[in-house]
Amino acid sequence: MLLWCPMGPFLFGMYMFFRGVIKYWVNHDTTYYVTSRRAVHMYRFIWLDTTEIPVNAINSISETRGFVETLTGRGSVLVASGIGARHKVRMGEIDDPGLVAATLRELVA
């Protein structure tokens, strides 16, 4: 029984470590662009996955922040033009999401 006591915290630590490494890796390969014509989400790893939403097709712009994101000044902006995964661009964990959301709202208006 004593041998299993350190195993729980060790496994939890390994889980959190690899979760952080994967999150860093995904964020490193993700790029967002906001132009006067469209909002673009690009993910490059082995392949290139691009989602684009033209500015004239944007239906909603929402901004979300969690507790930790509020403390660090980061957040997410969700741009949608319809229903479904291909009609949404989620710009996650960006600095100053309010500025990005305000810029998009200005372009849509």
Image (cartoon, helix red, strand yellow):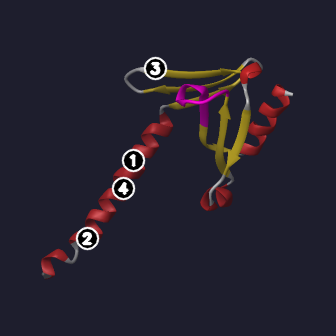
Quote the CA–CA distance across marks 4 and 2. Answer: 14 Å
- Mark 3 sits on what residue? 48
Numbered disc in front, either 3 or 4: 3
Could you say where residue 40 lies in the image, as x and y percent from the top left? 62, 24
Q: Earlier in the sequence, mark 2 or mark 1?
A: 2
Q: Earlier in the sequence, mark 4 or mark 2?
A: 2
At x 73% / y 34%, what residue is drawn?
60
Whether residue 37 is situated above or below residue 60 in the rendered picture: above
Q: Quadrant of residue 102?
A: top right
Quote the CA–CA distance across marks 2 and 1. Answer: 20 Å
Residue closest to the far bottom = 2
Whether residue 63 is situated above or below residue 103 in the rendered picture: below
Of residues 60 and 42, the one drawn nearer to the viewer in this rendering? 60
Could you say where residue 65 lies in the image, as x and y percent from the top left? 66, 53
Q: Dot 2, crowdedness within 10 Å: few (<14), some or many (≥20)?
A: few
Give the amino acid type for the residue marked by disc 4 in the picture.
Answer: Phe
Q: Earlier in the sequence, mark 1 or mark 3?
A: 1
Q: Which residues are magenta?
A: 81-90
- Mark 4 sits on what residue? 17
At x 55% / y 25%, what residue is drawn?
86
Instruction: Determine contact: label 4, label 1, CB under 8 Å.
Output: yes
Looking at the rendered structure, the secondary structure element under dot 3 is strand
- Mark 2 sits on what residue? 8
Give the amino acid type for the residue marked by disc 2 in the picture.
Answer: Gly
